[in-house]
Each structure stands twice: as C-alpha cells, then as structure tokens.
Amino acid sequence: MTPSAPRHTKTATTREPSRPNIVVILVDDMGYSDIGCFGSEIDTPNLDRLAAGGLRVTQLYNGARCCPTRASLLTGLYAHQAGVGHMVNNLGTPAYQGYLNDRCITIAEVLRPAGYRTIMSGKWHVGGRYEVEPETWRAGEPGFPTPLQRGFDHHFGTLAGAGSYFNPHTLMLDGEFAEPDDSRVPHDPDSGIFYYTDAIGRYAAEQIDRAARDGVPAFVYAAYTSPHWPLHALPDDVEKYRGRYRGGWDALREQRYDRLKELGILSGEWEISPRDVQAPPWDSLTPERQDWEDARMAVYAAQVESMDRSVGLMMEALRRNGLADNTLVMFLSDNGGCAEFLREDGRHGSARPLTPDGRPVRIGNAVGLMPGPADTYMSYDLPWANASNTPFRLYKHWVHEGGISTPSIAHWPAVIRAGGISHAVSHLIDLMPTCLEAAGASYPAEYEGRKITPYEGESLLRLFGGDLDWQRRETVFWEHEGNRAVRDGRWKLVRKFPGAWELYDMAQDRTELHDLSQSHLSKTADLAGRWEAWADRCGVLPWEDVRPGNRQRR
C-alpha cells in the first residue's frame, strides 16, 4: 500500500546529531495505580527505571476512551476536531465520522518531511470500524485510513480496537494483512510463540536498530493493547501472580493509596474514594469466587508486566545504539481502568471464533472459567478496575478522575533531570507541540493542498527542562457520550451524563468527593459557559442527538 506522501530518508552524512529520537508509548485501559512507580505491586522495572531517571507527571489527562485519546494524541486537537468525537462508528456528522479527517495532521505527517523515520507498532483504532469479518470494510479506502496513509513509513499492528493477544484480527505489516503464524511477524526467538504485546516491542526495537544503522532520527509510536481485555497472558507470567490477590480489592486499594502518598504522587489531604457501590465487599465472596477473582487479577497483572518487558526491548535497542540519552520517551495510558463486563453470550465483535490451532473460543466472564489462555475471552470487571484507579472514582468512558487520569512518565537524560515529580496540569493534546519543538519541526498551515486546523496543545518542553512551576495557559475540556468536564487551574467542573454539573477544588479534593457547585455558583456558571463555547467551536453535539441506536463499547 502506498502512503499518501513521499517518504524521506537521510544518510548518516546528513543526520543532525542533536535531534532526538522520540518514542511515545501508549498503553490501553490501564488505571492510575497499575505500575510500580505509581504505587502498584505489579513488577514494572523498565517503567520504574524510566521514572527514576526522568519525570513523573501526575496530572496529565487523556481522552477517557480509546479512540478519542488516540485521535487527540496523534493530532494535537480535541477528538471532535479530528473527526473522532465518539468512537469509530460513522454517526453522520463531521465531528463524529469515526476516522481521522483531512483537516487534521498527525505527528508522523509533520515529522516525516522534517527528516524523521516514522514508525508505528501496535493498535491504530482511528481508521473506521473494523469487525472480524473482513468483507464489511476495506482498509485504505475512504473512511478506513491506515497508518501508512497518515504519515508512518512503517507499521506493524492491528487496525481494530480489541482482539485476541494470540490471534488478533486486522493484523498488518507495512500495509499488507498478516496472520500470527506469518514468518515476517515478530515471535519469541526461543519459544516461537506469537504474543501481541511482546511482538509490538520486538518490531519497534527492530525499527530503532534500522534507523540507527541508516543514521536517521526516529519517531516511534508504540501503541499497546495491553492490558485491555481479553485477559490473555503467558502461563509463566500468570503463575507468578496467582495468590497475590487473595487479599481482595479492598485491601489492594488501601495498599496502593498508602504507597501513592509515600511516593509523593498524592497529597495526604486527598481522601481515597469509597469502594464503588457496585463492587461487593471482598469478605462477602465465597472462597471459590475469591479464587476465581484472584485469577482474573493475576492475568491482568501479567499483562501489565509483559507490557513493561516489551517496553524494555525498545529501551535496550536505544541503549545498544547509543541513543538512550538523546531520546525523548513519553509514556501514558489512553484512559482509566475498564469496568466493562463481557457477557457470557458466546459472541463479541472483536473475537475470532477459533484459536490458531482450531479450538473454540469461550467468550464471557463465566465464573470458575480460568482466564489467560487463547481459548478464553474475558475481562477483569468493575471491582478490580476500581482498584486500578486508586484513589479515584469511576472508570474508562467517564470524565471524572478515574476515567481521564493517566500515570505519565517523561524520560530524556539529555534534558530532563532524574527523579522529578510534576503536578502541573497537562493534556495529551500537548504531545504534538512537544514533539515538534523537540524535533525542530514546524506545524503547517496547509498540507497536500488543504488547510489544516491549528493544534490546541501547549509544548511541555519548559516543564521537561526543569521548570516544574510551568502551567498551561489555556483551559482543557472533555466530552464523551454526554459526559463533560472543564479543568482550569485548581478548578474542575464535571458532569456524569445525564446528571448535573459538579464542581471540585482539585488542590484540596482531587478524588472528587466534595461537590462545591452550589456554594460556588459563579464559578460553576463561568466554567459551564466556557464549556459551551468550546463545544460550539469544536463541533460537539448533544449526545441525545448523535448517539447510535445500538452503541458498542470498546
């Protein structure tokens, strides 16, 4: 498949040595406290090493859901401006067409003409709706753009939003569809096993090696599906965590909360949110149910650790090529922990019916069915997601802190001082200008003859350079399925659809437990008015008017 713009390749004699490599790592459906340097008991040594040698950013916000986050990250725009105001369904209006529009430009489309080799490894999910049955769509046709058509020189990964880790559908390698048993697809060199999380890191590492040999700076976008459902992990990784969660979600939340305070991530003034009312007390479960719940969380933890190990493959490639010191690495999650429950109806639009060796896939959270193998298709459910999002409330899809807060790390030894923590408010729209400033690239007013919407973000390089008092000049906004929020300095106005606005003083109450909307009526009205003006400017429509009749959550 031919990309829509000419590729640019430099030789070793023309490379500008001061230009950094840039690696953006996005993980999927991972909660705020799911990695070690943000309070977790899960082993994440590679991410912990990046945090120790870099900067932890405690209030970087995502877009609350897979597709909107990816659209904003790639373009520096709010998701509605890029055409992905909801998900990948085309809802019939420009802001909700379900794929990147021609008025936005991706980071890759800006950096490639500036001399960068642009590499993507992993999940795309901003190119229309891809179901398991290929006859319902055509990759690369109008409405189904692929990474190679949006600025990437090379891509390995999936187009769809979810799928098996052992047998994913819509798997592509440089514009051609591939299956996990394809010899071109990365496998474990010792076992020969294909496991998607591992393959994402292996492919990215290979491309880093090639760019280094060719003497060109690289922009790498590593977009993991881990730890999004289904609960799929390698047996040895799962066994390591079996029994670790028999203490239950109540104890786990308290342990993580205490650890977050010890690390300086949370203020001691912020109370932990109460256990979600839909989560039963751990002690009310039977021993058999506790064992099954322990197994579900063990697989989830194994997925997080395998992601960390995959990140380590990329970092090792940078080190062996002498590039680690002058590489900007940014890590974040696309939304908070996922409370979605997979019904035991034997069907799901992202699940292939058979494993690679022909066994039927058992779909759904059937109590007693042990998760992890390729012939299961399960999620870890609301109570564990509540623990993942410690200390916040709500989840992926909502715009309270549990839905939009990400553990974030920035690492760039040539620029960023080791061991820092910043509590500055930032948003993933800030990644576009940050990448451009780091690379010395310019954002165009036009691209391929069409006018481009100016980006909305603000560069984080002052923050990365040591100005920990840096603050955004502009307010940030959210809308997803009628859920709304505004963050301006210490104040946050938020609404859970179809409820009323709530107002929180985030300096005193980031866990959103004390609503001040009635005692601060002027502030509530001011922020609500600013949200309405933003919504009008960005093409946001009332959710009642655009919601699909059969909404599919991913």
Image: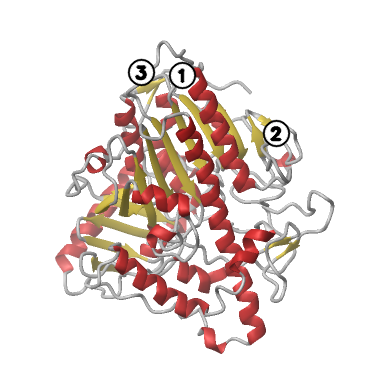
Residue 215: mark: 1
Q: Work out whether residue 143 can be spotted.
A: no
Residue at (65% x, 65% y) in the render: 239
Count of picture labels = 3
Q: Residue shown at 40%/25% (left/top)?
A: 110
Q: Nearer the viewer, residue 388 or 202?
A: 202
Residue type pointed to by label 1: Gly
Residue 103 on image: x %, y %: 41, 30
Please provide percent x and percent y for residue 144. 59, 35
Query: In the figure, 135 relative to 344: above or below?
Result: above
Q: Position of residue 354 (x, y in %)?
A: 80, 53
**Residue drawn at (69%, 40%) of the image:** 189
Number of other residues with Cα within 10 Å of mark 1, as a class: few under 14, some 14 to 19, many 20 or more: some
22 lies left or right of 520: right
The picture places residue 431, in percent across and down from the top left corner, at 35, 40
How far is the residue under mark 3 from the one under mark 1? 9 Å
Q: Is any part of residue 237 visible from this angle?
A: yes
Mark 2–mark 3 Cα distance, whole angstroms, equals 35 Å
Residue type pointed to by label 3: Glu
Tell us which disc is closer to us: 2 or 1: 1
Farthest right residue in view:
358
Above or below: residue 248 compared with residue 316:
below
Q: According to the image, label 3 marks what residue? A: 16
Along the line of sight, which residue is nearer the eye, 60 or 81?
Answer: 60
258, 322: nearer the viewer: 322
Q: Secondary structure at mark 2?
A: strand
For the point 26% across and 49% down, the residue is 533
Mark 3, secondary structure of its residue: loop
Q: Secondary structure at mark 1?
A: loop
Q: Is residue 362 left or right of residue 500?
A: right
Query: How many angstroms separate mark 2 from mark 1 (CA)?
Result: 29 Å
